[in-house]
Amino acid sequence: MSGILLTVLGIVAFAVGLLFSIGFHEAGHFYWARKFGMRVPQFMVGFGPTVLSRTRGETEYGIKAVPLGGYIRIVGMIPPAEEGESKRATRMRSFIAEVRGQAQDDVLPTDADRVFWKKPWWQRVIVMFAGPFHNLVLAVVFFAIVLTAVGTSVLSTQIRTVPACVLPAGAATAGAEDPCAVPITAAGEECTAGAEGCALPQRSPAAEAGLRPGDTIVAIGGTPVEPTDYSSWTTVQDAIRSSPGEPLDLVIERDGERRELTVTPIANTVYTEAGSDETTTAGYLGISPLGTLARQDVADVPGYFGMIVTNSVQRLVEIPEKIPQLFRAAFLGEERDVNGPIGVVGVGRISGEAFALEQLSGMEKLSFFLSLLASVNLVLFLFNLLPIYPLDGGHIAGALYEKARATVARLRGRPDPGPFDIARLMPVAYAVAGLFLALSLLLVVADLVNPITLG
């Protein structure tokens, strides 16, 4: 199959997976809304013009043209105006009244107690949490399948390369034909031999100790490591980086035999993480790992998933500070930050690129694709639980606030203040939606003109 067809197949496969994930999210809301007796007139996947729909019972099910979200419409999401509410006309009050009126238009005389706002607070929390929870379930299932059945890409403890000399991160001579023969300063700048602070690069500690490509580290600093465990290379890397100038015992396997070596990492300028421009001073040995596809034990799934969740939360928190760089990459031609935010278009493009890569085996492509869908579902779970209206987390926060307010009133011997009027947050909702739309458009532009690629 040609590269173009494989690319299209990868994009289509991701689009189908995304639609399924969105539909499964909405099914979570739908099931519990119906379970608690709420009326749900619409169940839609996508936005924009309706492509296909069918009405069964009291609900219209359909697919819309733009697969960037979905919704179910539950009647009575916004309560009616409270008695005694000011009727004095202001632009804000008129706007809230209009939104409230549109919500009440869906309520039929026969709905009675089937409206959302009349349901107990805990039922509303379950309904709104069920959608993101379904995404969490998909993320766990996909990651579990990848880890235990298909195999995941890991950096093994088998040594891929042993550079002959030590170059600081970002050294100007890194691209030279023989960088070990070019004098440099401590900062990695090329210099003239004999000048003060200028010397040939130091021989790497790994080469000094006799390590070779193909050697497999099975223990470091007295700690055994499983060569293909997802966290083993991190264990090796952390041990090396935390031991500059200190002897470090290694047990390696070479040609079926185990050997013990002692190496002494040196202090060197290294990158903080792959793809980052940030550097730090840490222990350096001079080895790089061999990547491979490996299955993990079922017992490894919780730890692996916890690591992914931690990284995902960190990436979400970093989004605001990365937006300026994203803007420059989209409109000013600056190099795209590979660790920055990426949109649906960019993820679909990466899926297509992975399908077309000849150097990846079929299992590696399947592993990458399922991991991609798992990551998307995890992000949907975390993002939707942000306590910001109109996200699911905003509705949950409103219900919890209503319960807390009622509890405080009861303890003070006061009457229940009633349902929390979420209509008053509609201006905030529109502002948040506007920000999300602007970010989405920025991501689309960046993903089209300056995409993140697997290369």
Image (cartoon, helix red, strand yellow):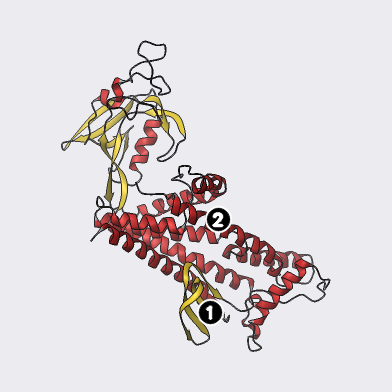
Q: At x 36% / y 28%, what residue is drawn?
A: 284
The amino acid type of the residue labelled 2 equals Leu
x, y percentage for residue 171?
Answer: 39, 27
Q: Label 2's element?
A: helix
Foreground pick, 434 / 390? 434
Find the distance from the CA under tag 1 to the CA under tag 2.
27 Å
Q: Amino acid at mark 1?
A: Gln
For mark 2, what is the residue? 439
- Above or below 17: residue 292: above
How many residues crowd mark 2 within 10 Å: few (<14), some (14–19), many (20+)? some
Q: Quadrant of residue 321?
A: top right
Residue corresponding to mark 1: 42
Q: Is residue 399 left or right of residue 30?
A: right
Q: Residues within 10 Å of mark 1 (few under 14, many from 20)?
A: some
Residue 197 x/y as whole percent: 41, 14
Q: Would you say residue 9 is visible in this rendering?
A: yes
Q: Position of residue 433 (x, y in %)?
A: 60, 62
Q: Quadrant of residue 371?
A: bottom left
Q: Are marks 1 and 2 in contact (CB under 8 Å)?
A: no
> On the image, which quarter does residue 19 sit in?
bottom left
Element class at badge 1: strand
Expressed as whole percent of the image width and height from the top left, the position of residue 172 reads 38, 27
If the image is split into quadrants, where does the N terminus sit? Answer: bottom left
Residue located at (38% from left, 21% from top): 190
Q: Which of the two marks, 1 or 2, is nearer to us in this view? A: 2
